[in-house]
Amino acid sequence: MTLIIIIKVALKMKFKIHTLGCKVNQYESQAMSEALQKRGYEPAQGEDADIFIVNSCTVTASADQKTRQAVRRFKRNNPDSIVVLTGCMPQAYPDKAEELPQADIVLGNKNNSMLCDAIEDYLRCAKPVCSIVRHETGDKFSGGTITSFEERTRAYIKIQDGCNRFCSYCIIPTSRGRVRSKPLTELKQELEELVKNGYKEVVLVGINLSSYGSDIGLTFPDAVECADQTEGIVRVRLGSLEPDHLTQEVIDRLAKCKKLCPQFHISLQSGCDKTLRAMNRHYTAGEYRNLCRHLRTTFPDCTLTTDVMVGFAGESEEDFRESLNFVREIAFEKVHVFPYSVRKGTKAEKMPGHNSKKTKEERCQIMIEETEKLRLDFFRQQIGKVFPVLIEGKADRESYFCGYTPNYIPVKVKAEDSLCGHLAEVRIDSVNADEDCCFGTVISGERP
């Protein structure tokens, strides 16, 4: 390093990472944080930082807007700071990054591992740095491993990247490339390192998680079994899954994993077959229904959560009602509802019958109100049941802590500080709709 860089690092430059989007982005932000700290940079408290990094999402127009707002705000409030834009937005839409002169450094998600070098190049030359490397077919998995996950008691582990599905509304194959999978040897090493640092629960995540292994001769259950068999890990959770990947063989293997939490987030998008075909999804509503029945039979007390898009191009009022009725029928425990957002470069961009913003907002509100009723009904059904809860941290009430049951019910309990990071047997006593959680009583706690 040049003298100026040595001086800057010696002065302990501070950085802040602002993460938008999915769990994979959160994992990659952690990896960037660890890389920066190894080079001598320090994480900032609040917004008192020398370097601001925006790890962007581009799955919707709203995500793009949040990215632009963050980049501009950081530079406006801290004009002498270094602002970095990375993640999916510059990777998919380099032209949008060019519209943000407030970003001193621009990197795509493919080469965000170059972050430290890019910062040092900027410090050396005081000139903007822009490096966006295209994803190519045949790329190998990259991104390394992490040793911790901020201050949380559960850690996300990215085991897969990219997607080969080309849903008609989605820009992800452009922003993330094709399917790439982490070798099991790297996964095992990462799991063991996290255990050493006190983590008991891990969440396996990916851009198209259930396609794990298709590029390296493995299958998705291979990764789950690797985590399940790691000594010190007590809970294994899964990110979002594609319904057509959950075959009988996959479900049978997952059912044998004793540490697997019975919570499945299975992407739906629509409960209307006509809309599913237009979206280029690879299943029917009937097939999805059968899968839900099978999972609930195989995994007692399991929860099923999902994503539902409303107002897709060509979606009629009848199509929307069909989707709404399907969501009611399945009775999901939680649903992420969002309006269709046009993504430049996708097939759906040029489809006929785009709905107005007002129509999409109205349908969103109807769907959200319905799914909130389903969630409240589910919570009420848990009253009186006892679950093991991993106490994760303090709640927003004095003397209360929060945690999750195996099937991901958020629970708040009165507890001692010493119980944080440990398992406790908790009885569900009541429901609080305003706080979207249940309240419970600790029956017995794991000895710290």
Image (cartoon, rainbow, N blue to C red):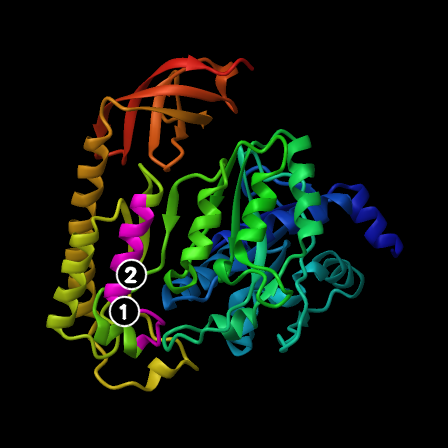
Based on the picture, tell me whether residue 320 belongs to the magenta stretch. no
Observer-nearest residue: 234 or 42?
Answer: 234
The kind of secondary structure the magenta stretch mainly shows is: helix
Observer-nearest residue: 387 or 358?
Answer: 387
Q: Position of residue 257 (x, y in %)?
A: 50, 41
Provide the residue designation for mark 1.
284
Question: Do the numbered discs 1 and 2 sit on residues whose CB atoms are within 8 Å?
Answer: yes
Q: Position of residue 198 (x, y in %)?
A: 62, 29
Query: At x 22% / y 70%, what residue is drawn?
Result: 311
- Residue 83, compared with residue 399, is above or below; it is below
Query: At x 16% / y 44%, what residue is drawn?
Result: 373
* SS under mark 2: helix
Residue 437 placement, left or right of 159: left
Provide the residue designation for mark 2.
288
- Residue 302, compared with residue 277, is above or below; it is above
Which segment is the magenta one?
A: 279-297
Q: Which of the 4 quarters of the picture holds residue 40?
A: top right
Q: Position of residue 175 (x, y in %)?
A: 53, 71
